[in-house]
Amino acid sequence: MWWTSPIWSRCAWRNCPTNDKQGIQRAISRRHIALIYAGGTVGMTKTARGYAPMDNFDAALATLLDGQGERLPRYTLHAYADPIDSSNATPADWLRIGSDIAARYHEYDGFVVLHGTDTMAYTAAALSFMLQGLRKPVIVTGSQIPLDAARSDAARNLVGALTLAASDDINEVALFFDTRLLRGNRSTKASAARMAAFDSPNYPWLAEAGIDMMFNRGALLPRPAREAFALPAAYPGMVLSLRFVPGMPLAALQALLALRPDALILECYGAGNAPDRDPVLLDLLARASADGTAVVACSQSPHGRVAIGTYAAGAGMGAAGVAGAADMTFEATYAKLHHLLALGLDAAAIRDRFVVSLSGEVTA
Ligand code: ASP
């Protein structure tokens, strides 16, 4: 974790002096939050085949939260009838959640999305591109242990997410997990074992829930003048990815390109490097770009940024029409490509605009 001159402060509930804890509590309890349950471990139970969605989620949730009384905002549960393990999520699931939030946007003060951790960062990034110009919090969370199991982290994550969804100062899609509030499109699942499962390697945390809720005000998106939602009708594009590994046969790239993807993400080494001894590789990429595939390079290193041409091995990719993803996460890169394709942009337009920030996902 690293910080860019953070300005931390305690209170993000308007009209409350920072030391007026009861005032903050009252402000929170007056808010009304939509709690969308899309699936994930949080609502699962052990079965003979492993963890699967439980039948009585509503009742288990009520048992968990009912004792909180006025300490939490009022919430209304919108539980999907078909909760999924998020490893089954597709762009259609992102669109379902985004459309549900957009449809109910004016009914609530904020939104919490309960989601599986495996693809939570993809969904958070996709929501941030659909719900541009947000003027309310959308907080995505879940848990590592089901909510009715021993040592579950569900209560901590849910209480934190609901509290943050009642804040005046969050105008973006954020991901809350353990003690960290992260920008949704900057987050990545960093641990399958730790309660602190998520991090944002290229961006400071937005807030930290310690004894006090401490906001990193300099890192939050400012409140925009108006919403500028961009909800595509569907996500019809095909986005593929290829991770360079030492000695990878070119046939792997040829096989992917034979599928004629709309976009291809190259997972390059370090600052955006790829093997350059075989000219056929660059020829294949140049031909794919010319044929209308948007080719984007991101890095296998979670921390840092892609700058194509820093090294000679990699410089040819720029000439072959490959755009660098700068400091975007893989998840944000993938969701952004789907988003831009769904909005009808062609490969040339995507290449030109790929590192223009839509919702704070990339550092200029
Ligand atoms: N497989 C689960 C999911 O992503 C993991 C989790 O929620 O922690 O739905």
Image (tube, helix red, strand yellow):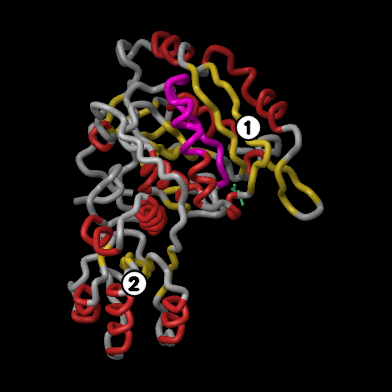
For label 1, count other residues whose C-alpha is less than 10 Å away and answer few (under 14), some (14-19) or many (20+).
some
Q: Mark 2 and mark 1: span between their CA atoms?
A: 40 Å
Which type of secondary structure does the marked residue at label 1 adopt?
Answer: strand
Q: Is residue 193 magenta?
A: no
Q: Which residue is mark 1?
A: 79
* Tag in front: 2 or 1: 1
Q: Is residue 69 above or below residue 228?
A: above
How packed mark 2 is, by other alpha carbons closer than 10 Å (few <14, some 14-19, many 20 or more), is many
Residue of label 2:
268
Q: Position of residue 351 (x, y in %)?
A: 25, 62
Identify the residue at image location x=44%, y=31%. Answer: 102
Count of number-bearing discs:
2
Q: Nearer the viewer, residue 358 or 299?
A: 358
Q: Residue at x 31, y 15 (%)?
A: 14
Q: Residue 4 sits in which quadrant?
A: top left
Q: Is residue 227 left or right of residue 52?
A: left
Q: Is 136 on the left-hand or right-hand side of 113?
A: left
Position above or below: 107 against 346:
above
Sequence-earlier tag: 2 or 1 = 1
Query: Looking at this view, is 143 or 261 the one in front?
Result: 261
Label 2 residue SS: strand
Determine whether, in the image, residue 74 is placed left or right of residue 225: right
Q: Kindly identify the amino acid type of the residue bearing the numbered disc 2.
A: Cys
| Position in image of residue 310 (x %, y %) | 18, 72
Residue in the picture at 25% in, 47% down = 357
Q: Amino acid at mark 1?
A: Ala
* First to last magenta residue range: 97-116
Whole-percent x, y for residue 346 in the image = 30, 60
Query: What mark, if any, has residue 324 been given in the picture?
Result: none
Q: Is residue 34 left or right of residue 206?
A: right
103 inside magenta stretch = yes
